[in-house]
Amino acid sequence: MRRESGGRIDRGTTLRFIFDGTEYTGHPGDTLASALLANGVRQVATSVKLGRPRGIVSAGGEEPSAVVQIEAPFPEPMLPATTVELYEGLVASSIPGQGRLATEPDPARYDAVHAHCDVLVVGAGPAGLAAARAAAGTGARVILADERSEPGGSLLGTRESVTEPEADDVLGPQEVSPGAEWAAATAAMLDGLPEVRVLPRTTVIGYYDDNYVVAVERRTNHLGAAAPADVARERVWRIRAKRVVLATGAHERSIAFAGNDLPGVMLAGSARAYANRYGVLPGRRAVVFTANDSAYAAAFDLADAGVEIAAIVDVRPAPGAAWAAGARERGIEVLAGHVVTAAQGDGQVCAVLVGRHRPDGEAAVGERELAADLLLVSGGWNPVVHLFSQSGGTLRYDEGLGTLVPDASRQAVEAAGAAKGVFTLTGCLADGAAAGHRALEAAHGTAVAERPAPPRATVEPATAPGAAFWLVPATDYRTHFVDPQRDVTVADVLKATGAGLRSVEHIKRYTTAGTAHDQGKTSGLLTTAIVAHALGVSVGEVGSTTFRAPYAPVSFAALAGRDRGLLHDPVRVTALHEWHVANGALFENVGQWKRPWYYPRAGEDMEAAVLRECAAARESVAAMDASTLGKIDVIGPDAAEFLDRLYTNLMSSLAVGAVRYGVMCRPDGMVFDDGTVIRLAEEHFLVTTTTGNAAAVLDWMEEWLQTEWPELRVHCTSVTEQWATVALVGPRSREVLAGLAPDLAVGAADFPFMTWRETEVAGIPARVCRISFSGELAYEINVTSWDGLRLWTAIMDTGLVTPYGTETMHVLRAEKGYPIVGQDTDGTVTPQDLGMSWVVSKKKPDFIGKRSFSRADTSRADRKQLVGLLPEDPAVLLPEGAHLVAGAEPPEPPVPTLGHVTSSYRSAALGRTFALALVRGGLSRAGERLYAPVGGALVPVTVTSHVLYDPEGARRDG
């Protein structure tokens, strides 16, 4: 229920929202969880496996139970109700431990920013604010990131105050301020400094090498439908910091007892936060179960706000004296040396069973029942060590604190305040300030001349040591929950240890404890302690599970940022694209490129169009836009040596003005890519690659240059998009080129195969190469991309040339047995398997893959080898990928296959269909009949040479 006054909410504004179909109201400053509690809604979900009711346990990102589905304004699953800020028109629903993804595209924008700083402070609680203030004092670049909507951390949920020890420009001399106001003023002061950036609503999710930290800022999530369309909903910050201070605070942990998952069971510090920050009382009559003094402060704040405290059940023999006195003043019964044995109720807490604790580990005795609708639990506090651990830091178990604390890290980072195991306000302020000073000194390399005294808590009672208490002994542990989100109980953990598991990592996976959305923030150490109890060892001996990024759930949309749709996979088009569109080309995607597939005329289907284009290339003249071929400039004194090492054949002997085909292999000897190498000058080569492999080849070159051969003086630059290339193909191509380039001697003797010339074509400066990927007389004409369309238009304006697309290109090259890397190869194919032993140099001392060719495996006679296939019925077109078997009658499964079809086409030149295939021992199977299972039938095919058209190569020179 809502308190009549108090809290940091805007009571003057009412927000309407819907939960599970019912309309409720709340106020700005509320979370969905606080608004539901204010409206008396206690069950907000059901558990994933057992279907048990789940309520609100915490007040922050550590929430293990209250996970909801946001339905409007845009669907988003699996969000803790404790982190969803309330806004007008919010529609949410409870879920059974599993959410639903949106079925429509997310209309919101997401982006990313890179930032550098001297000091990054994570967490804007008392320690973080003190650290940031200390670090920013001399003009250092500081980033302060905090996951909450406003600074203050634990100060927002308490009534603590802060005293400045000396005059301060913002707060005045010796001024005492309520903690939340001190936090707001300090953050405002920091935000006003030119070198300080304060990032609220920003969760640091990952800590990587070299102090590289990733955070996610929620910029408009809290605005709902009112969010501006031009502002990114979330932003990923990629931060490189000289020093990092982790002031990430601590999470309160629960205790395992019967019924501890019922709605109405809540962490004590969180109930205190609801009362003080949100003005919400989560119950009317409460029992407090604790093993430390912090729960007394929660009990007192709730009692002063109007909640009846039935009893404080303290497992220790006695609390701190000041806290015991405070309980007496308020008339609160303290049951020292007692435990809660069970929470009872049908769907929510209505009673609590209490008994005297037996230190011998046996079940409690002398049970009594206390009527209550709220049970507040505090088993202690766990420093939030997740990011410290991600940094490469080690953790140690502190027996005195009963928790894991940071030990040492290989990176420039330190923890401060509660994240370090300092749990007093004065201690946090002092530790944070000291950490900020140290970070500043380390970042700048100089000592801070003056360290002003840090602020302190105005009043802070002395505390008694807490007890590391994890489990209330019982005879049946089936309702002692360890991880309520995964429905994992103590019984499940004991089952795992009983099965012989000893590693907490194995037990985590066996039970699934700690694998839900919260990643074990409240259950992780509790699970470890239960394992230690079962094995009879200390908690420190068991250790902890690995803390991995992300620290908190992050949407894929945020990670993608603007890298989605066309910005993720951009559509690349050539300089000739608008002509292709205007002339009716249909396109296929090749990598990211839109390439003309074929150019159908009126009444033509694909088959008819491709046969016409093939006939033009074989009988007359045709042209293709080949601009998408990868083009890489390789320049430098060692360029020839570099290419000799990359290619299987010799490139250093290539004369200026000549062109050579080459193949690259990986170290295992398998074909990686192929293309041509053009020598433009003594130290300048132009390498062409397959369209889809252009980026991979450049990356391959850079990898070898930077990691294996850094001594080579070579630079590689992609120039794919700088050049437009037109392949002019066919018996009449020389005639067309002569008309367009009158100054170029195009005769066979003047312009031999695999050479290039510089000239003007259609008045455009061009580099013309005698290269053929069709087996016909052909030229590749290269001009700058700016001139590509003018060149193409001039060629088409001759009226002699037929444009053709990639499908025709594939037919032409397959007829000649030219393989396509990635289509006729599959990563297990050597040049020899492709019938190209001639391309593997026997003269070079070494090249990538050379040693692998001496392996017995690469010279086996039964390797898959490239062959041609002729279906017995010349009209049957084999599907690409079809398997090949030996017999006319298939044996019982599993059926051994001899290979598969890699390319299959209908040929105008051959007057029939044909295919290329990889067949085991294929080179020795010429003339043999094999069978391809197609549609329930076996199609007979005859193995032939993979060169089916003009095997003598007579057509190449016209």
Image (spheres, rainbow, N blue to C red):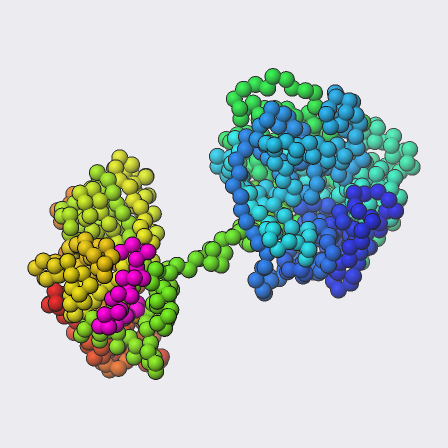
Q: Residue at x 78, y 37 (%)?
A: 158
- Report whether residue 338 is seen: no
Residue 101 appears in the figure: yes
Magenta-tinted stretch: 782-806
Q: Is residue 793 above or below residue 891?
A: above
The quarter of the image holding the C terminus is bottom left
Residue 601, quarter of the rendered image:
bottom left
Image side of residue 134 versus residue 36, left or right: left
Counting from the top left corner in percent of width and height, residue 604 is at: 33, 80
Residue 66 forms part of the magenta stretch: no
Which residue is depicted at the point 36% across and 64% down? 577
Task: State which quadrant residue 621 falls in.
Answer: bottom left
Residue 792 in magenta stretch: yes
Q: Pick out the residue farthest to the left.
A: 749
* Nearest the eye: 566 or 152: 566
502 with respect to 894 (left or right): right
Task: Please state the horizontal and vertical placement of residue 378, each as a whole percent of the image.
Answer: 75, 40
> Is residue 931 toward the left or the right of residue 417 in the image?
left
Count of residue discs: 0
Q: Nearer the viewer, residue 775 or 779?
A: 779
Residue 690 in the image: state x and y as whole percent: 29, 57
Image coordinates for residue 547, horizontal then vertical, percent: 56, 42
